[in-house]
Amino acid sequence: MKKKSVFDNPKLKEIFDLEALPEVTLEIKVADWNKLLEAFDAAPDVNFWIPGDFVFSGNDHIAAQKVPNVGLRVRGNSSRNRPEGNEGEHHNPKNPVWRQASFALQFGRNVPGQRFESLSRLDLKFIREDPTRIREVYSFDLYQEAGVYSGPLMSMCRFFIHIIDGGAKPAYFGIYKLKEFIEDDYLDARKTYFGDDNPGSHIPFLWKGDNGAALNNYDPSVIEDRSIYDLRTNTSSRKVANAQLTSFVRNLVTLKGDALKNWAHEAMDVKLLLKSYLINVICGNMDDYWANANNFNFYFNTHGKFFFIPNDFDTTLGTGWGIDAGTQDIFDWGNPGHPLIQKLLSVSDFLHLYISAFYELTNANDGPFYVSRSIHRIENWYTLIRPYLWDDTIHLACHNDEAGCVLQLPNKNHQTPFEDRPAWWTSGGNNRDYRLLERGRWNFFEVSGDKERIPQIHD
């Protein structure tokens, strides 16, 4: 197994350190907080930014510090929440009802050039409906364990919100995830890996794929739809970017046999792509490109080469719906109308790369997905976070009829169990039975990593 990636920005491994559990506090004035609540009520899907201070401490490698006047907003799609109270309510300083929400931070939005330890942006994600607390953390970390540099970095923190002139102490929102934002910082940290340290003649373009970004239709009405293909960098050159994406999709859809093989060798790092996507599959990610044409980024570098970038792992390791995440055919994982992986697997040399990646990740000698190694990492994280799952006066409670969680006095609501099982809404196959720490027939790592899923290995 390869060593973990070494990024051009050495600060990344210090910021996203899974052996640390720093404290992160957002200090916000009550007037600004109320503006955020009002804006959410008026248009919950619109990004409304307010100012606040970002306070960081508790990491041995990074000095405690306050980054003043950062931009912050609520983020998320189906997980997007009003962070306090009910519609129409302002901050309640005496008896606040907090709801877990995810936040996007932009350190230089109000102070141009300001950064936090070299980062211009950072995402704070609440742990949505996952009793184990670590499914997404595990999945993103697996990219690093496997030496797949395209995976964004993620770590955990203890998260507080402090309405500084609201008459209350900081509110503990629980264990949150710190996620690397996929944009300029992400690309700069991987410039050498992406081949941009020796730049070519192409304009580099980073895209986000959502809402049916299947890479199967090169009609201009689809390529130009920003709700499907959202260009995130060099947006002033959208026409050039559209033409490049159109050509890529046309070749992917129409080429076959040797023509497909030769084009793919030139157009992408096939080995990296298939290994990266195999991680999606063995983690059982149902809300991704292959299944839902959703939740992914992709990048064309300065040489015109395509790179796939994973983006979301909330529905993994047994949490999901429909198919059985541990036993679904890994060669026919998702929607056959989403051609990127299945077209590549139609080439025998590429199929062999995919199979080799499965063995590399799951073998008993040094495979990072192998059950004992997976359990060891999870148990270490539990040792780290367990003392901080509950506060002295407040705790978290998720309810089945809402995505968010309410923070109140313990006798005012219901606990969210911290236990080894999938989310309450999980369905399909054996998904509800899967466990991460309990060995045996329902251990997800044992089932998903079973070599019987790859009979060719034994040929």
Image (tube, rainbow, N blue to C red):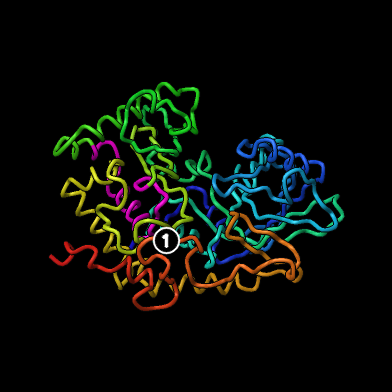
Can residue 368 be seen here? no
- Residue 351 placed where, x, y %? 20, 52
| Residue drawn at (33%, 67%) of the image | 367
| Residue drawn at (30%, 53%) of the image | 333
Left or right: 139 in relation to 62: left
Give whichever of 321, 445 is nearer the camera.
321
Was residue 204 drawn as part of the magenta stretch in this picture? Answer: no
In terms of image quadrants, where is residue 46? top right
What predominant SS class does the magenta segment belong to? helix
Image quadrant holding the C terminus, namely bottom left
Left or right: 258 in relation to 305: left
Estimate how packed mark 1 is, as few (under 14), some (14 to 19) or many (20 or more) residues with alpha carbons within 10 Å: some
Was residue 289 drawn as part of the magenta stretch in this picture? Answer: yes
Tell which residue pokes out farthest to the top in this image: 239
Image quadrant holding the N terminus, namely bottom left
Q: Looking at the picture, does residue 34 appear above or below residue 352? A: above
In terms of image quadrants, where is residue 324? bottom left
Can residue 28 be seen here? yes
Left or right: 116 in relation to 30: left
- Residue 68 placed where, x, y %? 75, 45
- Residue 291 placed where, x, y %? 36, 48
The magenta region covers 264-291
Q: Secondary structure at mark 1?
A: loop
Q: Residue at label 1? A: 427
The amino acid type, in three-letter code, at marker 1 is Ser
